[in-house]
C-alpha cells in the first residue's frame, strides 16, 4: 500500500522543495529538490510548527529535525 502523503507547502530553500505535517500521525514530510519525500516519525506539533514557520527552512531542518527523528523515504 502506498504511503498517503499530505498536501505539502512549497518552501524557498537550497535543498528542500516543500514540507507538510500530519498531526494525527505526528509525521513530518519533507520533499527534497530531487523529488524524494522523507517521512519523519513522532515529531511533536510544536516542533513541526516551529520548523514550518522558520525563515530559513534549511537551517531549521538542521536545527530541529536532522538526526533527531526516525525517517524513511516514502517517495523516491
Image (cartoon, rainbow, N blue to C red):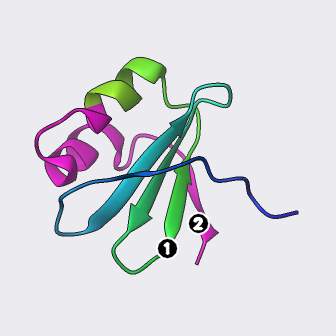
* Residue 67 among magenta residues: yes
Q: Quadrant of residue 10?
A: bottom left
Q: Earlier along the polypeptide chain: callout 2 or callout 1?
A: 1
- Residue under circle 1? 36
Q: Please tell me whether residue 43 is drawn above or below residue 31 in the rendered image.
A: above
Residue lying furthest top in this view?
46
Disc 2 to disc 1: CB gap under 8 Å: yes
- Dot 1: element: loop
Residue at coordinates 88% horizontally, 63% vertically from top-left?
1
Residue 71 placement (x, y as % from top left):
55, 53
Which residue was labeled with disc 2? 73
Please tell me whether residue 72 is drawn above or below residue 70 in the rendered image: below
Stretch of the chain drawn in magenta:
51-76
- Report the Cα–Cα distance between label 2 and label 1: 7 Å
Q: Using the image, determine if residue 73 lies above or below residue 24.
A: below
Which residue does the image show at 47% across and 51% down from the upper left? 8
Q: Residue furthest left?
A: 55
Viewer-nearest residue: 58 or 55 = 55
Q: Position of residue 50 (x, y in %)?
A: 27, 27
Which residue is found at the position 45% from the left and 77% from the top?
35
x, y percentage for residue 27? 58, 38
- 75 with respect to 43 (left or right): right
Query: Would you say 9 lies left or right of 21 here?
Result: left
Amino acid at each position: 500500500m502506498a504511503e498517503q502523503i499530505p498536501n505539502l507547502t512549497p518552501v524557498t530553500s537550497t535543498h528542500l522543495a516543500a514540507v507538510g505535517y500530519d498531526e494525527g500521525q505526528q509525521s513530518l514530510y519533507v520533499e527534497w529538490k530531487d523529488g524524494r519525500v522523507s517521512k519523519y516519525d513522532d515529531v511533536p506539533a510544536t516542533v513541526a510548527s516551529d520548523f514550518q514557520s522558520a525563515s530559513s527552512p534549511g537551517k531549521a531542518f538542521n536545527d530541529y529535525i536532522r538526526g533527531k527523528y526516525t525517517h524513511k523515504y516514502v517517495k523516491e
